[in-house]
Amino acid sequence: MIIRTEIEPSHRIVRLVGRFDAHETPSFRASVLSLVTAETNVLQIDLSQVAFVDSTALAELVRLQKTAKSFGGEVILVDLSDPVRVILEITDLAEMFTIIDAAEDSP
């Protein structure tokens, strides 16, 4: 999986490309661990290019959401690919996150 981060004063975005599974969660955790703090407590994760997500990756997203909420923030999931959307809906985890479609939010 490719992990790209955009760190701006006003926001933090992580863009994932490929399979998000148990093999990739350690590198994901290492990449995002320092991005959620009391000062920067909102993190957007772009999942538009994720072809597959497993239960370990879902657990990692939930862990990250709990961390963000402990700082008074949240994890926002952006542009879900169809496989990600389906698994979040099947597992009822979609309700834990704010989910946005960036194309719909653009003027």
Image: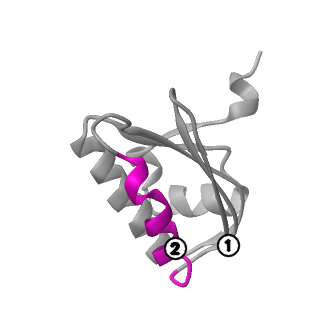
Instruction: Residue at 43% x, 49% y: name it.
Output: 35
Quadrant, the N terminus:
bottom right
Q: Is residue 55 visible?
A: no
Q: How many residues crowd mark 1 within 10 Å: few (<14), some (14–19), many (20+)?
A: some
Q: Indicate the quadrant containing the C terminus: top left, top right, bottom left or bottom right.
A: top right
Whether residue 92 is situated above or below residue 29 in the rendered picture: above
Magenta stretch: helix, strand or loop mostly: helix
Residue beneath disc 2: 27
Q: What span is colored magenta in the figure? A: 22-36
At 56% from the left and 64% from the top, the residue drawn is 87
| Circles 1 and 2 in contact, beta carbons < 8 Å | yes
User: Residue 29 location, x and y as percent?
Assistant: 44, 67
Q: Which mark is residue 1?
A: 1
Task: Give coordinates of residue 14: x percent, y percent.
Answer: 59, 51
3 displayed left or right of 64: right
Q: Is residue 86 left or right of residue 41?
A: right
Query: Hey, what amino acid is under mark 2?
Result: Ser
